[in-house]
Every structure is written in structure tokens, then in C-alpha cells.
Amino acid sequence: MAQQQVTAKRQQELQLQYTTYKNNLQQLAQKIGDVEQEAEEHKLVLETLEPLPGDRKCFRMINGVLVERTVKEVVPALKTNSEGLKKVLDGLLGQYKTMQDDMEKWKKKNNVQVVQQ
């Protein structure tokens, strides 16, 4: 009887740890998706603006305020932001891979097998 209680408690702990790993991976995947989408938007805007004359008027949203600028003022800022997003994305992808590897090691160490229902 006592052995069954220990086993049941251990199974609950393992299930909780597994759920935590899965939730963390899912949250990280969501962040990666958000950053990828923002990077793609920057890319599209840059592709649209780069062929235009530098003195052409354009508008940019800064902290929720639409401001008037010129193309030559906006393009460098967009490029800087785009490069920053790429670095953030690389970091998030590295974190995801590390977390995934940690989860696989944990599953092997604890002899966890996932059963799909």
C-alpha cells in the first residue's frame, strides 16, 4: 500500500514537471512566432521603402504616435530594428533548443514515456 502511494505521488510529480516543460516550450514558441512576424513586417516595409526617393514623406508609428518623417530618416532605424529582431530571434531559438534538449534528457533520466490519448 505504502509503495503504491509513493509511486502515485512520483507519477504526479513527473506529470507536473512534464506539463511545466511543455508549457514553457509552448510559450517560447509563441514568442518566436511573434518575433518572426515582426521581423517579416520590417522586411516588407524596408523592401517597399528602399526604392523610393530619400526625401519622400512617410509616416512611422513611435510609441503609439504616428509621426511624419522622410524615407532617408526611417530606413536606417528600420534596418537597426530588423537586425535587433534577428538577434532576439536567434537567442530565442537557442533557448528553445536548449529547453527541448533538457526535456529529452529529463525524460530519459526519469524513464518518461509520453502516451497520446
Image: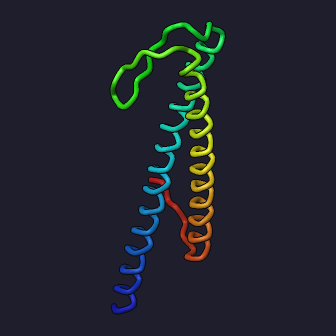
Task: Using the image, determine if residue 8 lies above or below residue 82.
Answer: below
The scheme the figure's colours follow is rainbow
Task: Using the image, determine if residue 56 lies above or below residue 106.
Answer: above
- Relative side of 113 to 30, left or right: right
Q: Which residue occupies the foreground of this view, 110 or 82?
A: 82
> Given the current orientation, which residue lies at the most extreme bottom position?
2
* Residue 105, image quadrant: bottom right
The percent coordinates of residue 42 (x first, y second) are 55, 26
Task: Using the image, determine if residue 11 lies above or below residue 18.
Answer: below
Q: Residue at x 59, y 59 (%)?
A: 100
* Residue 95, image quadrant: bottom right
Q: Residue at x 57, y 50 (%)?
A: 92
- Relative side of 53 to 9, left or right: right
Q: Which residue occupies the foreground of this view, 98 or 10?
A: 98
The percent coordinates of residue 48 (x first, y second) are 59, 13
* The N terminus: image quadrant: bottom left
Q: Residue at x 62, y 7 (%)?
A: 53
> Given the current orientation, which residue lies at the most extreme right position?
51
The percent coordinates of residue 117 (x first, y second) are 44, 53
Q: Residue at x 57, y 45 (%)?
A: 88
Q: Which residue occupies the foreground of this view, 94 or 19?
A: 94
The percent coordinates of residue 71 (x first, y second) are 56, 15
Question: How many numbered discs?
Answer: 0
